[in-house]
Amino acid sequence: MTPEPEPNYIIKICLLGEANIGKTSLVYRFIENKFKDNYKSTLGVNLLKKDMELKGYGDVSAQIWDLGGQESFRSLRRLYLEGANGALVIYDCTKRNTYEKLHDWIEDFKDARGDEPLVLIGNKNDLTDKIKVTESEASEFAKSYNMEFVSTSAKTGSNVEDAFMEITKKILDRNLNK
């Protein structure tokens, strides 16, 4: 049996945002293309991996760190962010308070990782009758931090792959052009 070839790149992506916004659902939709309604809250951090072949980049192994969003884990955030090449900063578009806390998550990331790439994700866009944060508002917020904005639904799978590909390519482009 021949061994698996080593990936061209190994990257660390963190998922940031308040508790119960769908971070775990997003990562499982991306990795397994599955959705469950009943994930338990992530305590601390959940580590996952996805190996991909990206045109123009080769084999990429993405280590995905799904960080617990509860305030009680804030003191561990810096430790979890160590070595991160980029992050998806996520809010639930049906819960305005999760959007209003984004600044804290972004600042914590920037304090730990400087100018590594970030992509803003507005999750749960399938719940159209409950949306409290418009895409245009989120897009303006993202621009103020020099981020891309992607509206997703872990439930339907809408734009989930696009969001992870966006951050992956931003990370690779940044590291290849240093």
Image (spheres, grey):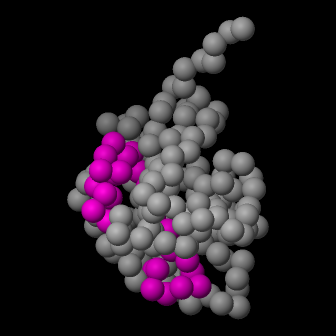
State yes or no: residue 82 in magenta: yes
Q: Determine the residue positioned at 76% across, 67% down.
A: 156
Residue 111 lies left or right of residue 88; in this view the side is left
Q: Where residue 47 appears, x then y in whole percent?
A: 51, 46
| Most foreground residue, 82 or 168 | 82
Q: Determine the residue positioned at 55% across, 73% down.
A: 21
Q: Quadrant of the N terminus?
A: top right
Reply above or below: 100 against 1.
below
| Most foreground residue, 64 or 7 | 64
| Most foreground residue, 96 or 73 | 73
Q: Determine the residue positioned at 55% across, 33% down.
A: 60
Q: Which residues are magenta?
A: 74-99
Q: Where residue 82 appears, x then y in whole percent?
A: 31, 46
Residue 129: quarter of image: bottom right
Q: Quadrant of the C terminus?
A: top left
Q: Where residue 131 appears, x then y in whole percent?
A: 62, 87
Task: Confirm whether residue 128 shows in the render.
Answer: yes
Residue 137 lies left or right of residue 150; in this view the side is left
Reply above or below: 69 against 2.
below
Q: Where residue 62 appears, x then y in whole percent?
A: 53, 40
